[in-house]
Amino acid sequence: MITLEEQIAEAQRELALRRKCYPQWIKSGKLDASDAHYQWQAQAAIVRTLMRLDAEQQQHSLFDASGGGVEWRVIMIFTKRSTTA
């Protein structure tokens, strides 16, 4: 199974490759500029979606499902906020 972290890395790698290669491909006529723009935007959206999913999963992992309680990280966040306010 390919982890979400690995998927994000591959999607970012592909986006960087397109950023590097597309200008030359457009210039040489190998790729239409409007197609390149659409494909680059689509790949960027994929990266954003995967990163949002990763952030949501990390946020959900703050809660301890096994005991129904709150993990210490959440307690530390609220403690820090209340002492700085």
Image (tube, helix red, strand yellow):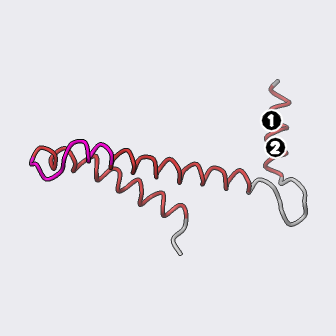
Q: Residues under labels 1 and 2: Cα distance? A: 6 Å
x then y, percent, for residue 79: 85, 37
Residue 17, placed above or below residue 77 = below
**What segment is highlighted magenta in the picture?**
28-38
Q: Is residue 48 left or right of residue 36?
A: right
Which amino acid is tagged 2?
A: Met
Q: Is residue 4 left or right of residue 11?
A: right
Looking at the rendered image, the quarter that the C terminus falls into is top right
x then y, percent, for residue 43: 39, 51
At 90% from the left and 60% from the top, the residue drawn is 68
Question: Magenta span: helix, strand or loop, mainly?
Answer: helix
Give yes or no for contact between labels 1 and 2 (Cβ–Cβ under 8 Å).
Answer: yes
Q: Which residue is mark 2?
A: 76
Front in this rendered view, residue 45 or 12: 45
**Mark 2 falls on what kind of element?**
helix
Q: Quadrant of residue 23?
A: top left
Determine if the magenta segment contains residue 35: yes
Outermost residue to the top: 85
Outermost residue to the bottom: 1
Determine if the magenta segment contains residue 46: no
Front in this rendered view, residue 20 or 72: 20
Which amino acid is tagged 1?
A: Lys
Q: Which residue is mark 1?
A: 80
Residue 57, placed above or below residue 38 = below
x then y, percent, for residue 81: 80, 32
Query: How many other residues sit within 10 Å of disc 1, few (<14), some (14-19) or many (≥20)?
Result: few
At 28% from the left and 51% from the top, the residue drawn is 18
**Mark 1 falls on what kind of element?**
helix
